[in-house]
Amino acid sequence: DLKIPVTGHTHTLVHVDEVPATETEEGVKAHWHCEGCGKNFADKNGETELTENDLKIPVTGHTHTLVHVDEVPATETEEGVKAHWRCEDCGKTFSDENGENEISVDDLRIGRVEKEVQTGENAPAADLVTPYEELIGAVLTPDDQEIINNGSNIKIILTVDVSEDDTSDEDKAAVEKAVDSLDNYKVGQYLNVNLLKVIGDKQEKLTETASPIKIKFELPSALRGSGRVYSVIRVHGGETSVLSDLDNDADTVTVETDRFSTYALVYSEKTGVTPPDGNGTGGGFSKPDENDNAGNTDNNISDGSGNTNNGENSASSGNTVNTGAEGGANSGNNDNTGNIDNNGNTDNGGNFGGSGTENGGSDDGAGNANGSGITDNTDNIGSDNGGDGNPTTGIVLSLVPLAAAAAALTLSKRKKK
């Protein structure tokens, strides 16, 4: 009789508007909320109660608007950026056009190749003048290039030091031998030239490259001189090479080389000297003013291609001088290309034919069927065709009076008869 029944709770409900979901945040559904007990309901009468999960609206997610970004190659001074896809809305980057594989800024880096030149005391200033891409191809291996593509940098260092005291006796002897073979050249300065490759904290000394690179040396003031011709002699692995100067600057020497060890700056003060025709990839050296093949003579360097001399006759292989007198059989003369072909006598400024005393009545070479390339040069016997010619011994000239005397004697005998 004393109990009073529970009166129950009367909800004081207020409407809560929907909070839409975003790409990153969940939303909240519209509902009714009791200010007294804090419960949530789907209806204004408070009959269908809702939980927190019932009210959640899932994150909508992001639909990327992707654009392709082209690769930016690395340079000597700036790193590169790989090709990729970027969302114009959120700024995220991806490796694929579907936006499934997100990548970071570090993933996009392309490393660069930095070059550096280090010169020792009294050594000439130097520079690596090979274009950037060619330098990479010459110095770096495929594995090195993959390292760059993965974002790491690589440094190439050229070192140049004076090595007069450090050069071995064998290398100096090789340089001196090469200098002796050149035209009036002298050794100016011995150098030790090295190439280093640095990846991270690892340094590697290179003795050869896959292809030649260009190095420019600035001539020391002590070696400069008006009219001088410069070259570089390289000794590497027992091979001696002459490296020609590739530039026209009187104060520098630019060479192409693929090996790194002992170098020597050499020069000539002789007026009109032709620089040695050397290159940076072969062993051996050029020898100016010498014949490479018998019968070939060139004013500077014979290249063995059949070039003939200018102003001189060369000694032809196996060619002899005419020894017959009147209508002689031209005994001992080989009819090689460039020799008088014995089709008739001509005076031809001292040239003497073989069989017969006349050639169509011509005695001045006008009717002479002589060998290809024979000229009307006084005292010349051989030709300069193909490099074969008779030596200028003067023997033929001494036979001319003999031939005349023999002809006079024959005529005298005929008159007596």
Image (cartoon, rainbow, N blue to C red):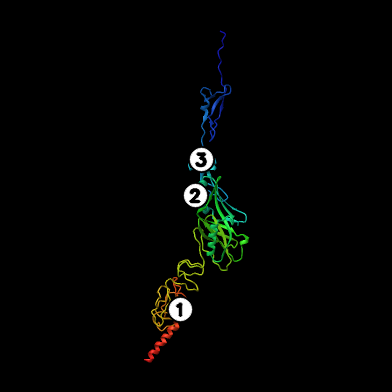
Position of residue 350 relative to residue 110, above or below, is below
Q: Earlier in the sequence, mark 2 or mark 1?
A: 2
Q: Determine which of the numbered discs, if any, sits on residue 395 in the image.
A: 1
Rounded to the nearest angstrom, the CA distance separating label 2 from label 3 is: 30 Å
SS for tag 3?
A: strand
Tag in front: 1 or 3: 1
View extreme (left): residue:
417
Q: Position of residue 253 (x, y in %)?
A: 57, 60
For marks 1 and 3 on the same chain, the one whose residue lies earlier in the sequence: 3
The residue depicted at 55 percent of the width and 52 percent of the height is 195
Give the label on residue 102, or none.
3
Where does residue 345 sit, x and y in percent of width and height?
42, 81
Name the residue nearer the viewer: 79 or 330.
330
Residue indicated by mark 2: 141
Q: What kind of element bears circle 2?
A: loop
Q: Nearer the viewer, residue 126 or 335?
A: 335
> Does residue 205 show up?
yes
Q: Are marks 2 and 1 in contact (CB under 8 Å)?
A: no
Q: Secondary structure at mark 1?
A: helix
The kind of residue on which mark 1 rests is: Ile
The N terminus is located in which quarter?
A: top right
How packed mark 1 is, by other alpha carbons closer than 10 Å (few <14, some 14-19, many 20 or more), is few
Residue 32: image x %, image y %?
55, 26
- Whether 308 is drawn above or below 265: the answer is below
